[in-house]
């Protein structure tokens, strides 16, 4: 229930669709920003799917690697690593050329205290990477935060609906998209932009935030009363399979699961944890939502349903499983992170 090695193995386990996609894909894969919450399991997924497909390719992970342990762990699983500051043009130039790029660089938390660094990380670094890998296929992780709050009576915005970012983090995230769009327009770079919200696994995510609050006895604010969630492995699977759909101009896809009630999620988590959740506030008529109908049409529905997610997270917390210590702050409605 709280075996992190087993969890990492499960999160990086390829499906037949992953294996088939990486059998058809040509060339090596480089993951920029590999040391974040999702990057290690995505890189391992790419490695394992390639191996099962019988394809010999390099899977390369790039990050600053402030912790040597993270670098060593990736190398232990057959992933080559390069330490690199994404804001250093010369360091980017030293990276190996690669036909397939997964771009996972971004900053969200700490924005309110250091807006210039957030804009540099989310916008300037994107421009540098797009320039460096102009001839590659690039899958870019973005966020559903580029959309405005939407009525909960709807399914949320689709890819063709207007964006309307709230707050500087969301604005800079849209800036990241615009930099890749500009470089695609200028250089013909083939790109997919993935608007994700919210990725879930037992050590972080909306469900972990709710479970921790329930166990502590903290009241759960219902102002942001609805969310979308998707299991991390399912989101990473879509990212890797999206490499085959890179296009110019960029192809945009929302990645998430169906809308969920925060009150209902908390009640179901509390039942599994054996603790009655406490609530405060009332549900608003709007929330940060995304319509992922296109993603389901292209890649099928997520393999992991919300019921299984709730069970996995609650059992992990109940067994004393560790946390990444990175709360989502999904309840923020003013865009301040």
Image (cartoon, rainbow, N blue to C red):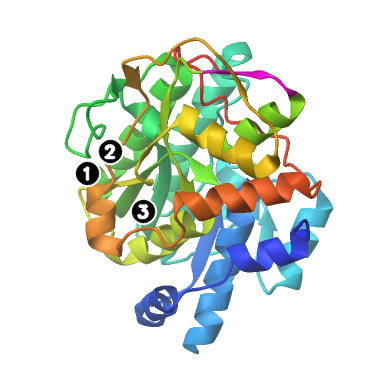
Q: Helix or strand or loop: what does disc 3 sit on?
A: loop
Write the residue at 31% across / 52% down. Answer: 192
Q: Helix or strand or loop: what does disc 1 sit on?
A: helix
Q: Helix or strand or loop: what does disc 2 sit on?
A: helix
The residue tagged 3 is 134
Number of the label disc, if any, that sits on residue 185: 1
Dot 2 alpha-carbon crowd within 10 angstroms: few under 14, some 14 to 19, many 20 or more: some
SS assignment for the magenta stretch, majority: strand
Query: What span is colored magenta in the figure?
Result: 217-221
Query: Can residue 202 be seen in this snapshot?
Result: no
Query: Can residue 104 be seen in this snapshot?
Result: yes
The residue tagged 2 is 182
Q: How far, Cα to Cα, is label 3 from label 1?
A: 11 Å
Write the residue at 40% across / 82% down. Answer: 23
Q: Which of 266 and 138 is in front in this view?
A: 266
Above or below, 182 against 309 in this view is: above
Q: Determine the residue located farthest toward the bottom in the rendered image.
A: 54
- The picture quadrant where one finds residue 74 is bottom right
Write the residue at 55% across / 68% down. Answer: 45
Q: How far, Cα to Cα, is label 2 from label 3?
A: 11 Å
Q: How far, Cα to Cα, is label 2 from label 1?
A: 5 Å
Above or below, 118 against 31 in this view is: above
């Amino acid at each position: 229930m709280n075996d992190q090695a087993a969890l990492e193995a499960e999160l990086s386990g390829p499906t037949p669709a992953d294996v088939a996609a990486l059998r058809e894909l040509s060339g090596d894969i480089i993951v920029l920003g590999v040391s974040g919450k999702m990057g290690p399991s995505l890189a391992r997924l790419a490695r394992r799917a390639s191996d099962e497909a019988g394809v010999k390719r390099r899977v390369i992970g790039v990050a600053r690697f402030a912790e040597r342990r993270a670098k060593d762990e990736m190398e232990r699983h057959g992933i080559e690593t390069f330490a690199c500051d994404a804001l250093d043009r010369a360091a980017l130039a030293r990276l190996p050329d690669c036909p397939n790029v997964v771009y996972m660089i971004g900053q969200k938390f700490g924005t309110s205290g250091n807006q210039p660094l957030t804009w540099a990380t989310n916008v300037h670094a994107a421009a540098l990477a797009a320039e460096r890998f102009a001839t590659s296929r690039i899958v870019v992780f973005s966020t559903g935060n580029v959309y405005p709050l939407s009525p909960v009576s709807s399914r949320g915005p689709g890819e063709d609906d207007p964006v309307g970012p709230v707050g500087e983090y969301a604005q800079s995230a849209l800036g990241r998209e615009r930099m890749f769009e500009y470089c695609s327009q200028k250089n013909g770079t083939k790109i997919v932009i993935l608007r994700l919200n919210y990725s879930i696994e037992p050590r972080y995510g909306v469900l972990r935030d709710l479970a921790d609050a329930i166990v502590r006895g903290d009241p759960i604010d219902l102002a942001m009363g609805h969310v979308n969630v998707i299991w991390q492995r399912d989101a990473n699977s879509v990212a890797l399979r999206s490499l085959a759909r890179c296009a110019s101009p960029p192809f945009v896809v929302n990645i998430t699961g169906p809308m969920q009630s925060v009150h209902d999620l908390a009640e179901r988590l509390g039942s599994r944890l054996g603790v009655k959740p406490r609530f405060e506030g009332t549900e608003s008529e709007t929330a940060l939502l995304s319509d992922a109908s296109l993603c389901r049409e292209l890649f099928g529905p997520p393999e992991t349903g919300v019921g299984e997610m709730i069970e996995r997270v609650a059992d992990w917390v109940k067994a004393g499983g560790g946390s990444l210590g990175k709360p989502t702050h999904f309840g923020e409605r003013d865009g301040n992170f």
